[in-house]
Amino acid sequence: MGEYFKYHNVTKDVISEVSLPFNFAMPWAKDLHRYTTEENKEFFQYVIDNNDWNDTDKIVAVGDYGTIVDDPRDKEWERITMYQVDAFTDKPFHGNAAAVCPLGKWLSDEKMQRIAAENNLSETAFFIQMGDRFHIRWFTPVAEVDLCGHATLATAYVIFHEQMYKQENITFESRSGDLHVSRRDDWFVLDFPNQAGKPCSPPAQLMDGLGHEPEPVEVLVSTDYMVVYESESQIRDLKPDFSCLSQLDLRGVIITAPGDEVDFVSRFFVPQYGINEDPVTGSAHCILTPYWAEKLDKTSLTARQLSQRGGELQCELKDDRVLIAGKAVKYMEAQIILRR
């Protein structure tokens, strides 16, 4: 068996073997065994029963973390494990849901975009591991984006909890440069770039989309527009015109104000990317955190996003970086099955 797994790029011999009972999830499998390598990676081997398939019995190896290494059915079908994780919350049905797809190699851009559109979540993240680093990409239902906080947090959850990653820190390569995620008890801490905004004159579509009353305190621009108001109630009550906001030249629109129970609150609108209101947006806090750190004269801040699902964040300004912490919970694990 060691030679078999060496053939599949596992460098260490199998050192243990456990015979497993019948698995109701694989009724067509028999002779199910679990093997453990010296690298402490687990593999499962079973034999496809020819009573269920018009073929002779064939060995199938399921590799690290459930990735199918060798399956005779894969000549016709492609299988991709997918997790759905609620980020910036510790309760299902809250926070911001993201789909996460671990890959052995990149799919085509078209296929990843179609998967994201089919999921119809605010973000679907795809990642591959490259040595001790990971490469991550994010897709909304309509386009790839440069940065996404909640889907990065969801991906870190999958790597730490589903793939049993043993290190305390993850480095992602992305279109926004290197991103770092660490664990702090039950919290995941995103290390993102500081994207502080600058004061600007608001374009007509922005104020038409938000309404001219109440009048904002100020407007800033960065990767998104950020509009500051006086009170949390104004943020809760605002009813945007998404057709106007969809005409803007930047990714989205943040509205924010001091919070009643936290340091600041916000909402985030991204209609041009197919998301009228994002439930919880980690990347928006790259703009929010430096602003409120200056206004409140403190570097550690508590934040709440006031969407229908809601989300809680802890933010810290650290030089040219913003640390954004949140929790996450797995909602679903599934398999995408596509004809090749």
Image: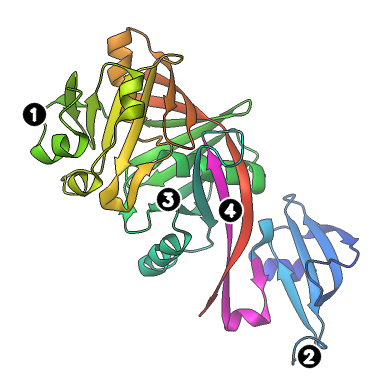
The residue type indicated by label 4 comes to Tyr
Say whether marks 2 and 4 touch (CB < 8 Å).
no
Please give the label number shown on residue 83.
4
Q: CA distance from mark 4 to mark 3?
A: 12 Å
* The magenta segment: 68-87
Q: CA distance from mark 2 to mark 3?
A: 42 Å
Query: Main structural element of the magenta stretch: helix, strand or loop?
Result: strand
**Helix, strand or loop under label 3:** strand
Residue 33 lies in quadrant: bottom right
- Where's residue 254, x and y in %? 28, 32
The 10 Å Cα crowd at callout 2, few under 14, some 14 to 19, many 20 or more, is few
Sequence-wise, the earlier of marks 2 and 3 is: 2
Q: CA distance from mark 3 to mark 1?
A: 30 Å
Which of the two residues, 280 or 77, is positioned nearer the viewer here? Answer: 280
Q: Which residue carries the number 1 mark?
A: 201
Q: Is residue 194 visible?
A: no
